[in-house]
Image (tube, grey):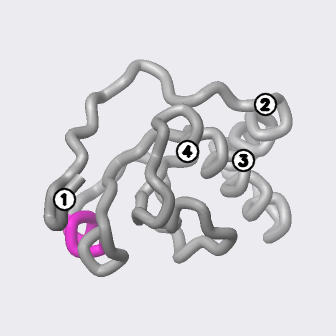
Amino acid sequence: MGEGESLKLVPEEAGPRLPPQALKLLSKLRNQQPLTDRELVNLMDILAQRATEHYRLEHGKFVAITFDGKIVELADTKLDLLRRIQSRRFPDQIFVWRIGYESFSGRR
């Protein structure tokens, strides 16, 4: 994909399959039960890994992912990604991540 090109995301009925541990944490999150920092990071790790495999995401790109593993936006740079999502409203929480890296940029 060339500079400035955007991946055309096709809505899917289901995102990546998640292991029972992730489903349990998602249930807690949806029921507005508090997650520890460790649980939240663990959930984001699982989601990032599964989304990368499921969507065959390219290393180094920036992605906004919902907590059920669906991709809402993808970009070449963090700034481009943030510009694309800044004024949008999402029905679910999302987090921003650079594919192939271990740290997450944030969530909203």
Disc 4 versus disc 3: nearer the observer: 4
Kindly indicate whether the residue at mark 4 contacts the one at mark 2 (C-beta within 8 angstroms): no
Say which residue label 4 marks: 52
**Residue 95 visible, this angle:** no
Kindly indicate whether the residue at mark 1 contacts the one at mark 3 (C-beta within 8 angstroms): no
Label 1 sits on a secondary structure element that is loop
Q: Residue at x 50, y 59 (%)?
A: 59
Dot 1: few (<14), some (14–19), or many (≥20) neighbours within 10 Å?
few
Kindly indicate whether the residue at mark 2 contacts the one at mark 3 (C-beta within 8 angstroms): yes
* Rendered view: 48 above or below 19: below
Mark 2 or mark 4: name the one nearer the start of the chain: 2
Say which residue label 2 marks: 19
Kindly indicate whether the residue at mark 1 contacts the one at mark 4 (C-beta within 8 angstroms): no
Say which residue label 1 marks: 2
* Rendered view: 20 above or below 35: above
Could you tell me how far apart the alpha carbons at marks 4 and 1 are, in whole angstroms?
20 Å
Could you tell me how far apart the alpha carbons at marks 2 and 1 are, in whole angstroms?
34 Å
Mark 4 or mark 3: name the one nearer the start of the chain: 3
Q: Position of residue 39 (x, y in %)?
A: 82, 59
Q: Residue at x 49, y 48 (%)?
A: 66
Residue 81 lies in what quarter of the image?
Answer: bottom left
Q: Position of residue 24 (x, y in %)?
A: 80, 36
Q: Is residue 75 left or right of residue 45?
A: left
Residue stretch in magenta: 82-87
Dot 4: few (<14), some (14–19), or many (≥20) neighbours within 10 Å?
some
Label 2 sits on a secondary structure element that is loop
The amino acid type, in three-letter code, at marker 1 is Gly
Relative to the observer, which residue lies in front, 49 or 70? Answer: 49
Mark 2 or mark 1: name the one nearer the start of the chain: 1
